[in-house]
Image (cartoon, rainbow, N blue to C red):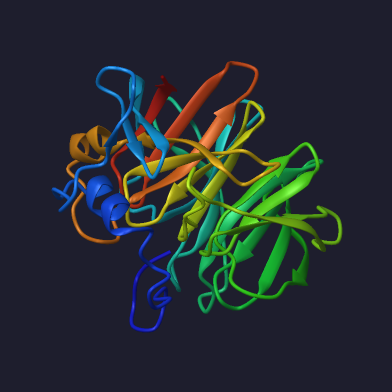
Amino acid sequence: MTDRPGSRRRGSGLVLSAVLILSLTGIAPAAAPQAASAPGATLIHGTPMQNATIVARYPHDRAAFTEGLFWSEGFLYESTGMEGQSDIRRVRLTDGKVLARTVLPPSLFGEGIAPWHGEIVSMTWRTGIGFRWTRATLKKTGSFRYPGEGWGLAETPEGFVQSDGSAVLRFRDPASFAEKRTITVTLADGTPVVNLNEVEWVKGEILANIWETATIARIDPATGRIKALIDLRPLRDAVGASGRDAVLNGIAYDAKGDRLFVTGKNWKTLFQIRMR
C-alpha cells in the first residue's frame, strides 16, 4: 500500500500510541518505554520488543512495490502494487530473477496473495475485487468480490487470514472467501494496533508487518494479543530505505526448511532472518 491523498488516513486511529510510533520509527519518544525485568529488554505497552538475526541476504527487484509474499515448492511468489504496475510473479530465491509473471489490469492496485490447493488467491486494494490463478502457470481461473479494503493475505490451518489496514484480522473460507471470524490485534495492555499489512502464518502465530514502521508483530491467532514486536530497523538501514513508501513489507516462511524471509517495498535485498 502507498500513502496518497485520501488513501490510508484513518484519523486518530492511525497512531498506535505516541510511545510506540516514535520508538519504532527511531525518533526519541517523549517518555521512554517501560524497562522489562530482563536486562536490556524493552516493553511497549507491556509487550516485549525483540530483535532478529540476519541469516542470509538475497537480491530483490528494487522496482517491486511488494504487497504480498509467500514460499511454495522451492520458489517465492510475490504480488506488487501501484495502478499500472501491479503483477504476480514467481521468483528464484538465489538471484531474485523473475521466472514468470502475470499483470493485473492497469486500473487495479495489487495486494496480498496466498496459496490454496494449487491456486493463488489475490486481492486488490480498494476495488473489492479478488482473483484466483493457477500456481503452475499464473493463469487466471476466476474472480470474486469482497467488502472493504484488501491489504495482506495468508494461508492458515483454518483457511485464510486477511488484513485490511485496521486492527482487525479476518479469517476467511478459502473457497467462498466468506468471513468466518475476526480478532482485534492489541498490545498487552489492550491498546489496538492498526495498519496491519502483509501477514504470514509461522509456527502457530500470525506475523504481520505494521505499516510505516520497520516492525513485525507476532500475534496470537486465538486472542489477537501481540506476543512480541520484532524490531527490524537494522534491515531498513542496511538497504538504505528512505521515504514513507519504502517500508518493510513482505513475509514468507519456508516450513520445510524452517526459513523466514522478509523484504520491503522497492528494497534491493530480501533477508532470511531468525527471530530471537
| Residue drawn 45% across the image and 60% down it | 195
Q: Where is residue 102 in the image (x, y as percent from the top left)?
A: 58, 57
Q: Position of residue 11 (x, y in %)?
A: 39, 78
For residue 194, say whether it is visible: yes
189 up-or-down from 184: above or below: above
* Quarter occupied by the N terminus: bottom left
196 up-or-down from 41: above or below: below
Q: Which of 181 and 161 is in front in this view?
A: 181
For residue 136, say whether it is visible: no
Q: Where is residue 180 in the image (x, y as percent from the top left)?
A: 82, 57
Q: In this view, does 200 lie to the left or right of 172?
A: left
| Residue drawn 51% across the image and 45% down it | 208
Q: Is residue 64 left or right of residue 90?
A: left
* Quarter occupied by the C terminus: top left
| Residue drawn 41% across the image and 39% down it | 46
| Residue drawn 30% across the image and 60% down it | 245
Q: Position of residue 200 (x, y in %)?
A: 58, 40
174 up-or-down from 92: above or below: below
Q: In which quarter of the image is residue 225?
A: top right
Q: Quadrant of residue 124?
A: bottom right
Query: In the orientation shown, which residue stands out farthest toward the right?
Result: 175
Q: Nearer the viewer, residue 140 or 68?
A: 68
Q: Which of 233 and 98 is in front in this view?
A: 233
| Number of disc labels | 0
Q: In this view, does 262 lie to the left or right of 59?
A: right
